[in-house]
Each structure stands twice: as structure tokens, then as C-alpha cells.
Image: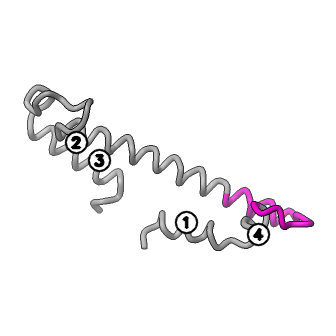
């Protein structure tokens, strides 16, 4: 389980946050507000992370000649070594390579 999965599980299992989402809290303490904001922040970061991963996938497809935005040929875009370097950067950014 990676950190994103752990954060998703944390959100899913947080009782205060889920009760707040379901409008089942009759009283909200300062600690409850802190927990709720913490979970909202985690959800926002996970959403931003997903958007970045999608953008990286789009760049990867362009470099690999896949889809509408793809270069007509790899040689028209960049040298093969450049493409390999960029793909490695994308993998590292997505956490696929350590």
C-alpha cells in the first residue's frame, strides 16, 4: 500500500469526517473542526495529485506517439535520449521509480 492508498483509507475510515459528510454531527468541537479540515485538505491534495498524474500521462503519450496530440514521429519531437530522460522524470514524479 503506497501513501496515496493509505491517505484514501484514512479518509474512508475517519469517523468524525464521515459523520460530518453524512450530517450526523450534532455538535462540532474545535478538535472535530481540525479533523474535518485535515481530511478536506487530504482530499484536495489527492485530487491535485491525480490531476498531475493525468497531465504526466498525457505528456508520456505525446512522447510515445500515442493519441491525438502525439508527434508525427518521435524523431520530429526530441532525440531518443531526451525522450528517455523525460519519461524517467515522469516515472519519478509519479512515484513509479525510487
Position of residue 62 in the picture relative to residue 30 (left or right): left
Picture quarter containing residue 62? top left
Percent from the top left, x then y, of residue 74? 11, 33
**Chain-order first, disc 4 or disc 3:** 4
Magenta segment includes 28? yes
Q: Secondary structure at mark 4?
A: helix
- State how far apart marks 4 and 3 are (Cα): 36 Å
Which mark is on residue 86?
2
Task: List x then y, in percent, for residue 67.
Answer: 24, 36
Asked if residue 59 lies in the magenta stretch, the reply is no
The residue sitting at 85% across, 62% down in the picture is 30
Coloring basis for residues = one colour
Q: Which residue is mark 4?
A: 16
Q: Which residue is mark 1?
A: 7
Tag 2: Cα neighbours inside 10 Å, few (<14), some, or many (≥20)?
some
| Tag nearer the camera, 2 or 1 | 1
Residue at 78% x, 68% y: name it.
19
- Residue at mark 3 to residue at mark 2: CA–CA distance: 6 Å
Amino acid at each position: 500500500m503506497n501513501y496515496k492508498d493509505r491517505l484514501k483509507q484514512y479518509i474512508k475510515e475517519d469517523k468524525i469526517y464521515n459523520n460530518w459528510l453524512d450530517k450526523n454531527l450534532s455538535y462540532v468541537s474545535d478538535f472535530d473542526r481540525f479533523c474535518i479540515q485535515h481530511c478536506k485538505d487530504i482530499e484536495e491534495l489527492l485530487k491535485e495529485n491525480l490531476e498531475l498524474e493525468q497531465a504526466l500521462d498525457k505528456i508520456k503519450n505525446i512522447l510515445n506517439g500515442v493519441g491525438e496530440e502525439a508527434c508525427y514521429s518521435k524523431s520530429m519531437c526530441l532525440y531518443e535520449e531526451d525522450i528517455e530522460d523525460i519519461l524517467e522524470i515522469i516515472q519519478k514524479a509519479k512515484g513509479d521509480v525510487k
